[in-house]
Image (tube, helix red, strand yellow):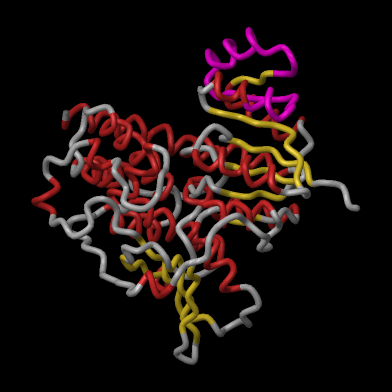
Amino acid sequence: MSARRRLLILGSTGSIGTQAIDVCLRSGELELVGLSAERSWEALVAQAREHGVEQIALADEHAAARAAEVWTDGRVLAGAEGLVSLVLESQPDLVLNALVGSAGLGPTVATLGEGIDLALANKESLVVGGELVTALAEATGARIVPVDSEHTALHQLLAGQPAGSVQRLTITASGGPFRGRGREELQDVTVKEALAHPTWAMGGKITIDSATLMNKGLEVIEAHHLFGTPYERIDVVVHPQSLIHGIVSLADGAMLAHMGPPDMRIAISYALHGAQSVALPIAPLDLAAVGELNFEPVDLDAFPCLRLAREAAREGGTAPCVLNAANEIAVHAFLEGRLRFLDIAEVIERTLSCLGSEPVLAFESLYEADRRAREEAAGTVAGLS
């Protein structure tokens, strides 16, 4: 019997992380060797105790200090440096990066730099540093497998397709809680309404990204880097049932669609098992009960974040980094009640217009662009509040 693969989960207390632990416990092929969270130290310590993990990390240093006071069965690492140290010192064979936002870039770089395979749920790593991240993986031989229903679908559909046979990729969108509403109907939507996603149970930031459709813009950028597909050949279509997750259009006119229940454990398990499908306790779809599937175009007037993401993607350089940073600042302000829903796109557009794009020469230039974008976006939020 071969040795189990050592798994480190970054972001283990969130939605993806907790489901990943469930997948891991059902598998005889995986062994948990490390866990991390941003600031949920009580939940993280409980996970470490339950699963016998000896090393944990908390990005928030105050939370790390609290964890170290009550948990003496292992080592507590702190801050952004602690997350990187956890990657380097826990000696994993596989890292699941389920961190939220651009904070995931550092651990992604550390993982790939060591030649460790990466199950990537942190799409911002590729949005912010796509070309450098993929080049690093190629240089070290590390494998990146996406943890996302749409990119998992495309990854499976593209497997074995010969060069030149694929014409287009299509990413599906549920449409979020405001599907069908015009721009004028979104003027006064509340945080509670925006968090009421019709299909998926996710964290606050990604749920708001789904409501603005920024998540689809980020997914377009991610797909470009994962699959080497030009932006003009990546489409987005609204599919409210969320049963078809990705479509590949072939040169002969045929289309291959990946269909399945809206359960993130499918994507998580696929990535954790080396891009292989294994048995899960998930009931198959009853197609007769489903009855029909619907598709709609995206309303870019009501949801301009997808347009802004495509524009930043085509601009290249630091523009996607600026886009992501401004979005994180704007979404945080909206969740705190300091910004209106439609002003999220306004903050992003103004920040992109002000800072433009510069060449990406190294990861340091991305960190500087991220810092400047956050400052500019915060100033814009203050002006709009």
Q: Please say if 368 is above or below 131.
A: above
Q: Please say if 138 is above or below 68.
A: below
Q: Nearer the viewer, residue 282 or 268?
A: 282
In-image side of 304 versus 214 (left or right): left
Q: What residue is at 36 percent from the left and 46 percent from the top?
A: 323
Number of labels in the image equals: 0
Q: What residue is at 10 percent from the left and 50 percent from the top?
A: 185
Residue found at the very far top of the displayed protein: 69
In-image side of 267 versus 142 (left or right): left
Q: Nearer the viewer, residue 47 or 316?
A: 47
Q: Quadrant of residue 304?
A: bottom left
Q: Quadrant of residue 235?
A: bottom left
* Image quarter hosting the C terminus: top left
Please check the rendered image and state whether residue 65 is part of the magenta-colored stretch, yes or no.
yes
Q: Please say if 199 is above or below 249.
A: above
Residue found at the very far bottom of the displayed protein: 252
Q: Can you give x and y, in whole percent of width and height, for residue 226 in the image? A: 56, 61
Q: Quadrant of residue 311?
A: bottom left
Q: Nearer the viewer, residue 158 or 325?
A: 158
Q: What residue is at 51 percent from the left and 55 percent from the top?
A: 148
Q: Can you give x and y, in whole percent of width and height, for residue 300 in the image? A: 22, 61
Region rendered in magenta: 47-75
